[in-house]
Amino acid sequence: MGPGPTDSTAGSPGPPDRQTLQLLDRQLRTESLIAGTEFDPDVYEPRLLHALVDAGQYPETVVAARFDIRWFTTDDFSFHYVETHQDDSRWECRWDRHPNPHNARLHFHRPPNAVAATDLSLSSCHPLDVYSTVLDAIEGRIQSIWEQ
């Protein structure tokens, strides 16, 4: 799995929040939707958490899906969801909270390519609430793919 998004023009969102990444990892390991998790670079100094979505949840046109999580001590974050399709195309989106020149601090990069961004409103930016929002959206995406 490759690295998640970076935005060098926005400045640093701060150091990684390792405790929050480990909390999210423990939560992900209880989800039937998730096939596995992996820290980057490792469990002792995590900067990024990869979550592999169970490919069996999708029609065969989707060959892989994952989301990459970054969480910082400033409570900034990034949840980057990526599907890879049989034709090697990708469908992706991203929930972000960080200083940036393009939108409000809290924003969503819309699918299918996660380039265009729109301001986002969440009732809570607690890690487990953001996690729940993202997982609900992924479950909705899987359902919409099956309905197509």
Image: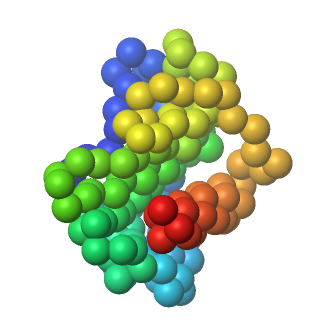
Residue pictured at 48% horizontal, 26% vertical: 116
Relative placement, left or right, of 90 versus 14 is left
Relative placement, left or right, of 112 versus 135 is left
In percent of width and height, residue 18 lies at 46, 59
In percent of width and height, residue 146 lies at 48, 71
In percent of width and height, residue 5 lies at 35, 38
Residue pictured at 71% horizontal, 55% vertical: 126
Q: Quadrant of the N terminus?
A: bottom left
In percent of width and height, residue 93 lies at 46, 44
Q: How is the image coloured?
A: rainbow
Q: Residue furthest front?
A: 148
Q: Reply above or below: 140 against 70.
A: below
Relative placement, left or right, of 97 versus 28 is right
Q: Reply above or below: 111 against 36.
A: above
Which of 5/46 is in front? 5
Count of marks placed on residues: 0
Q: Residue furthest right?
A: 123
Residue 70 is at least partly visible in this image: no
Residue 132 is at least partly visible in this image: yes
Which of 83/11 is in front? 83
Which of 117/77 is in front? 117
Residue pictured at 62% horizontal, 43% vertical: 75
Give residue 137's quadrant in the image: bottom right
Q: Reply above or below: 20 against 93.
A: below
Give residue 36's quadrant in the image: bottom left
Residue pictured at 32% horizontal, 45% vertical: 4
Q: Reply above or below: 132 against 124.
A: below
